[in-house]
Image (tube, coloured by chain):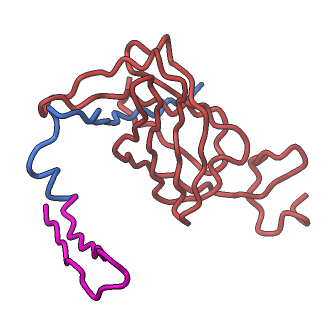
Chain colours: A blue, B red
Amino acid sequence: MQEIITFSLNITLMDEQSLNVDTLEEFDVDVTTVYTLDSNVDTQIDYSVER
Amino acid sequence: MAACTQQVHLNDIGTIFRATINDCVSGQQQVLDVSGATTLQLIFKAPSGNTKTKTAVFTTDGTNGQVEYTTVSGDIDETGVWKIQAYIVLPSGSWRSDIGKFTVHENLSEIIYGMGHNNGFNDENPYTGF
């Protein structure tokens, strides 16, 4: 006698076609990067990216 | 012949865990040909949270998406609800499956005698039961 336990497991092979809006929403990020143009000058640009 | 269901019990050895790997294409389940996989693993997570990663083999040749692992001593060491997940590496990338569940049932006695098997006795005190 041998017990056999069976499963059906799903894998999603991600490619561009399989990406959709719902998936992209999971990866929403809010990135803020500060660039200093010249360390001798007190000037900087706040650069913000949202996607 | 009466209907029955497969059950996994604590310390079972030789139980085959067979997974059919499917790809989800446009919302439809399709068997994934895993014959080209370079890594095939089944990951088991016990109720306590301990995980065991086991190398799986093709049930046939992998073209039908079926991989399996046969339990050995020490694998099924907790009762309760376990989780199982497949991990495969194909030339095009590596993926983990969704997570399946199965229950490991208790035994009447887990008294270990000599050869490491339950001999069927169920005495309250195994050392005075003979």
- The count of marks equals 0
Q: Position of residue B118 (x, y in %)?
A: 76, 48
Quadrant where the image shows the C terminus of chain A: bottom left
Q: Nearer the viewer, residue B62 or B71?
A: B62
Give above or below for B115 relative to B127: above
Give above or below for A50 relative to A2: below
Query: With B39 as the anchor, is A51 left or right in this view?
Result: left
Query: With B117 as the anchor, is A21 left or right in this view?
Result: left
Residue positioned most to the left: A21
Q: Residue at x 29, y 74 (%)?
A: A37
Give above or below for A26 relative to A18: below
Magenta part, dominant SS: strand
Q: Residue at x 39, y 25 (%)?
A: B92
Q: Position of residue A44 (x, y in %)?
A: 24, 81
- Name which quarter of the figure residue B29 lies in: top left
Quadrant where the image shows the N terminus of chain A: top right
Q: Residue at x 73, y 42 (%)?
A: B73
- Name which quarter of the figure residue A39 lies in: bottom left
Tell whether position B115 is magenta.
no
Residue positioned most to the bottom: A42
Give the residues drawn in magenta, as a range: A27-51
